[in-house]
Structure formats: C-alpha cells, structure tokens
Image: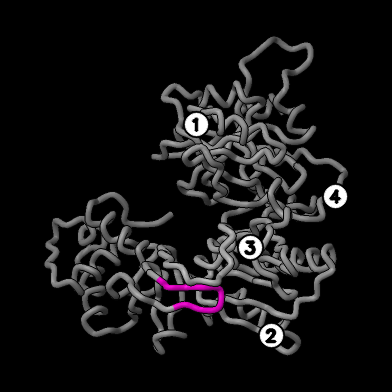
Amino acid sequence: MHAAWAAGEIVAVKGIGGYHLTCDAANDVAVARLRTRKGRVEKPFAEMVRDVAQADALAELGSAERRALSSSARPIVLAARRPNARISPAVAPGNPDVGMMLAYSGIHELLLSPVPGSEPEPPRVIVATSGNRSNEPICIDDDDARARLGDLADAFLTHDREIHVACDDSVVRIVNGAEQPVRRSRGYAPMPVTLPIDAPPTLAIGGELKSAFCIAAGEHGWMSQHIGDLENLETLQALERSIASFRTMYRIDPEVVAVDAHPGYLSRRWALEHYGERGTIVEVQHHHAHIAALMAECGASGAAPVIGIAFDGTGYGAAIDGRPAIWGGEVLLADYDGFERISHLAELPLPGGDAAVRNPWRVAVAYAVASGIELDEACAPVRIGGALGSALVERQVRRGVGVVPTTSMGRLFDAVASLLDVRHQVT
C-alpha cells in the first residue's frame, strides 16, 4: 500500500461502511488523476490522518475541533487550512478549509502506521473519498466495487467481512464552540432523535438532493445515514434497502408517509408507488419542513407559531400559489400543522430550470433583463454566455418561454457571483 501511494497510484480500500478511493494527499498528479477519474471537478476531498497531532499540522484546530476528531463518531471535521500544510492544493481548490478525519477502523490504523522494519518516514496523509463515481452511491459489495471502480482504482485492498448497510463518512463544522453537522451519517445515524411531540408510525422520505429519510414513532425519530442525490437507479435502490433495514430493525410499519410537495421528485414518486394505497400520504412544503425540523431540534412544542426564515434550494410552491413557482427565500409564520407565507424575495425568472442552476451566467442575464438593467458585451455573464447565448436567455425572459418564477436566495447569490466574475458554472 505504501509503495502504491508513493508511486502515485489510487487504491480502493474497503472499510466498514463502504469503499474509499485513496491516494497520497501531497501528490499533485495523483490527486488530479483521482479528480479526473471520479468526475469530481472541484468539490473538496477528505483526508485521513493517523492522530490529532498530524491533523493539527494541517489545520488550525481549537479544543472543540480536537474533541470532534477524536470522538467515537470519528467524523470529517472542517477547519481552516494552515498555509504550510503538506497537502496538494488540488485537494480542496480555492477553499480555505480542509476536511480531516482520524483512522476509525483496524485496517485504517494499520495503513497509516509505519511499515515494520522500514526506514522512518514522515507520516503520510491520504485522500479518503467515497468509493463511487460522482452522483452514484458508495460501493459496499466486492463484485460491485470491482465492476464500478475498476477503471477508477489502480489496486484494491479488501477483506472478507460483508458490509450490510452503506454509510458515508459524517461531516461536521465547529460554530461558536458547538458541533454543527454538515452531513449526518456514520457515527451519528441511526442514533434516535427525541421529538417534542408524539408521532404516529411515520416514514418521511425527504427531498431529491442530499437525500435522507426518517422513521418515527412516539417520541423518537430515527434519521437515516446520508443516501445521496436521487438522480439514478443505484441511489434509489440504496434508499429502498435502507428503508427496509430500518423498518425491520425498529419494527415500525408506517401508517403515515410524508413526501415533498414537488411532483417531479423521484422520492415522492417512489413513495406514492409503494405506499399510496396502504398509508396516509402527507405532502409537505420543502421550506415548511426545514422550519418544522428546526422547531423539533429546539424542542418547541408547537403550541405557538414561530417566524421561520428559510433560505434553501428548490421548494415547490404551487400548492399555495396555485401555479408552479420555485421558492427559496421565504419568511413563514409556522407551526407543525401548517404555515402562512408572510414574506419572500421578489419573484424573478429562472430560464431553463436546472440548466440555469448549473450555469449562473444565465441567471445573471435573466435577472438583469427582468430588472431593466442593460448588460453590455464587457459584462462577465454576457462574455461567458456569448452574444448568442445571452440573446437566447433574454428572449426567453421577455417571451416567458421555458422560465419559472423563483424567489430563491441561492439563485440571487449565483447571479451576483456571475456579475462579479466570480463563478459562472457550477461543478
């Protein structure tokens, strides 16, 4: 293994929740090769280190970060990277932070320990990213791993212990001395969450991106591990397996199934197909769900409504307005049962739906046209989109063809980022 890493090779390593793709984090060529093979253009890679002292050499750690790193959950901890950190800039391009975790299984401990009888060498930091292609679930089965990772990895390190439940690494950040989860998975799920109100036997499916589900009964809810983006059959099958496992493990047969109100979500269609005739289906508006979740986290009884501010991605608003609209910059007066939309960002046109989300220059041009602002050829979004592309977006907006109104705060940030020549495409 050490020789393979030293040679710049990528090694698929079987852990306890799935495979990792690993390489020497200080090797620019190896990290770049891993990005190319995995199809991960710029999103940061996590690093695995042997101990807290090694992590401290990479990032500026406070006591809370050290506690999180060495806790039994062993999450990836995000912290500010030191200027002299001995890792490739390609590990997290353009990002001031680095994500680190300690070895959390016997095989990891052995891999990061010095080779007996060899000359002493500086402790190696390895990239340890999920063993999958971008947008696919993590590999847990040996045959599946060889099939799906065969052209990503140069070598495999496996063992004979079966993995029954796929589980990605958890990610946390320390905010004002408190641990805040970014991704709740290995080490945290399926630990129960205490609910402030009693729930009937319930399955909550969740949204489309960064998917997770929850099974609840009485005063407890069991959150699943991070499943991934429901964009393909493999991830949907991983969701199905995890739901079946949770139902068996906690002996809960759902009487109520909560789904996102967006009619196009694969998670919703799956729930309607499997539970539409044998359970009560409850549609939940995306941003109301965020606020209700925060109420539950804070232990609110729901006896009095709260003012909730939800700045989050795609939320279907047609159930309230009677017409399709993408919400995302909302102020709601809400309790657990419902909500009143009391304020929101101004509606602006989103040209081409997902195509605009992936290309902020389109959002910038559309918002400028809708706001009566002239953009000349020197403006960054027009330069990136080209004269023809910008003219097509302008025509879409003026004619109202292929545009959806949105109040999304994220799209407003995208538009400003493109106008400032910071970012024009999302990778």
Closer mark to the observer between disc 3 and disc 1: 3
Q: Amino acid at mark 2?
A: Thr
Closer mark to the observer between disc 1 and disc 2: 2
Q: Which residues are magenta?
A: 332-339
Residue 264 to residue 165: above or below: below
- Evaluate if marks 3 and 4 touch, with contact meaning CB atoms under 8 Å apart: no
CA gap, disc 1 to disc 2? 53 Å
Q: Where, by quadrant of the figure, is residue 243 drawn?
A: bottom right
Q: Identify the mark nearer the N-term, 3 or 2.
A: 3
Q: Which structural element holds mark 2?
A: strand
Q: Amino acid at mark 3?
A: Ala
Residue annotated with mark 1: 28
Question: With 226 as the anchor, is 41 left or right in this view?
Answer: left
Please tell me which residue is depicted at 63% across the width and 46% down the height of the picture.
170
**Which is nearer the eye, 91 or 384?**
91
Q: Where, by quadrant of the figure, is residue 385 drawn?
A: bottom left
Q: Which mark is residue 280?
A: 2
Q: Identify the mark nearer the N-term, 3 or 1.
A: 1
